Amino acid sequence: MTERFVLRNQLPEVESFQRRLEALLRGYAFSDDLIHDLSLISEEMLVNIVHYGYPESEAGEREIKVVLAIDEARRICLEIRDDAIPFNPLAAEERDIDDDRLGGWGIPMLKTLTDHVEYARVGSENVLTLERSERDS
Amino acid sequence: MSLEIEIYKSDDGKCKVELIGRLDTNTAPDFDTKIATVEHAEFPIQVVDLARLEYLSSAGVRSLFKARKAASDAGGQLLLVHPQPQVKKVFDIIKALPSTSVFESQEEMDRYLDAMQRKSG
């Protein structure tokens, strides 16, 4: 199963994407735990792109593309693709909590809540790919 | 999806703030506004009850942290109680808050407050 989403670079789109993602995963009977984690990572990553990726004058005018794939083994792959300024959340420094930049928690969130994560700059795009399966609780 | 904020003020200088729903990028500004209306001088101890908070993102953690700092700058305290598993997981990942400000239960928090009182009194 593969589902494609296109979001405008504005905050309400992030929230509505989260709702759709959660509903879709619930439809596939994934656990609340997994749905929570993927929704949380989506918020963290997408809000970061919306807040810092583009000039303010372009708010709502650019597209962020998300592809959700579920394979036979019920492994979930989420790809987030944007044409914002180059930003590798895996290389970002962990920041102090007083720092207003959200990306500071990208590394610990991504590391803890995914099974595998990769970043690549492809042409003019940031491509973040992450995988996650159910975990034994 | 939203956040409900219930504020209960008692006569003994304690104020309980119950969060219901989601504290995230969308709802954090509302929490910031509401918590700022609680006077530190009148309520030096602010308890944020997380029992019915289902979802917390880093934007929400930042708001809790700011409120905690505002309380301590004013000589008071902001304590968090009853984090649910999903919320606790986020605190664990971010490690932003000292363990002395998050309590699993009311009893645990009361013991802490009693000990504090004895120390100062």
Image (cartoon, coloured by chain):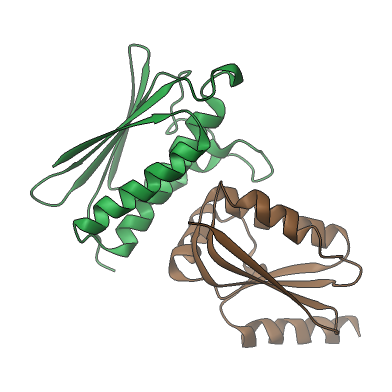
Chain colours: A green, B brown
Q: Position of residue B10 (x, y in %)?
A: 80, 82
Q: Looking at the image, which is closer to me, A70 or B100?
A: A70
Quadrant holding the C terminus of chain A: bottom left
In the rendered structure, the answer to whether residue A108 lies left or right of residue B45 reads left
**Whether residue A94 can be seen here:** no
In this rendering, position of residue B36 left or right of residue A116: right
Closer to us: A105 or A27: A27
Residue B84 in sight from this viewpoint? yes
Residue B113, image quadrant: bottom right
* Residue A66 appears left or right of A107: left
Identify the residue at image location x=18%, y=56%: A28
Q: Quick check: A83 left or right of A71?
A: right
Q: Is residue A18 above or below residue B108?
A: above
Name the residue at 47% across, 56% down: B1
Residue depicted at x 79% and y 68%: B77
Toward the top, the furthest residue is A123
**Residue most extreme to the left:** A72
Q: Name the quarter where the N terminus of chain A is drawn.
A: top left
Q: Position of residue A15 (x, y in %)?
A: 45, 45
Please tell me whether residue B93 is drawn above or below residue B114 in the rendered image.
above
- Tell me where residue A75 appears, x and y as whole percent: 17, 48
Image coordinates of residue B47 in percent, x first then y, are: 71, 73
Q: How many numbered discs? A: 0
| Relative vertical location of residue A5 with respect to residue A25 in this rendering, above or below | above
